[in-house]
Image (cartoon, rainbow, N blue to C red):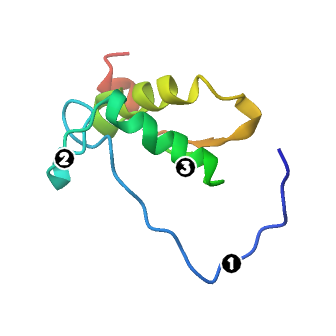
Amino acid sequence: MTSTPLSSPPVALGTWSWGTGDVGGDTVFGNDLGTAELKPVVDAAMASGLTLFDTAPVYAMGNSERILGELLAGYDRSSYQLSTKFSTGIADLYGN
């Protein structure tokens, strides 16, 4: 994987929510996409050089991380960047 210095692009890409619904889909915006429907999206992103994926355990009660993990498992770990979030309340969410 090659890297370049950080810079501000002239065009910023928006974000797409896919794990904010109660069952791992994008039900907030009216879609309910499962792993099979999202695989071509991740494959196209990787093929196009879009390799930063952002998620969090609170997105769909962990389903966002689970689905993304399944989809990225077929790729070399050095070929993408993964971002997540953490809060002190996350342990309460999962009963720990």
Between the residue at mark 3 and the residue at mark 2, the CA separation in whole angstroms equals 19 Å
Say which mark, if any, is on residue 45.
3
Between the residue at mark 1 and the residue at mark 2, the CA separation in whole angstroms equals 31 Å
| Circle 1: element type | loop
- The answer to whether one can see residue 56 in this image is no
Q: Tag count in the figure?
A: 3
| Circle 3: element type | helix
Give the farthest residue toward the bottom.
Answer: 10
Badge 1 density bin: few <14, some 14–19, many ≥20, Cα 10 Å? few
Q: Name the quarter where the C terminus is drawn.
A: top left
| Circle 2: element type | loop
Between the residue at mark 1 and the residue at mark 3, the CA separation in whole angstroms equals 20 Å
Image quadrant where residue 76 sits: top right
User: Going from the N terminus, do you reach mark 1 or mark 2 first?
Assistant: 1
x, y percent for residue 85: 50, 43
User: Going from the N terminus, do you reach mark 1 or mark 3 first?
Assistant: 1
Q: Are marks 3 and 2 in contact (CB under 8 Å)?
A: no
Q: Which amino acid does label 3 sit on?
A: Ala
Is 52 above or below relative to 13? above
Q: Which amino acid does label 2 sit on?
A: Asn
Q: What residue type is labelled 1?
A: Ser
Is 32 above or below relative to 93? below
Badge 3 density bin: few <14, some 14–19, many ≥20, Cα 10 Å? some
Please name the residue shown 38% across and 34% down the image.
64
Q: Name the quarter where the N terminus is drawn.
A: top right
| Location of mark 2 (residue) | 31
Q: Are marks 1 and 2 in contact (CB under 8 Å)?
A: no
User: Going from the N terminus, do you reach mark 3 or mark 2 first?
Assistant: 2
Is 21 above or below relative to 72? below
x, y percent for residue 90: 39, 31
Give the farthest residue toward the top.
Answer: 96
| Location of mark 1 (residue) | 8
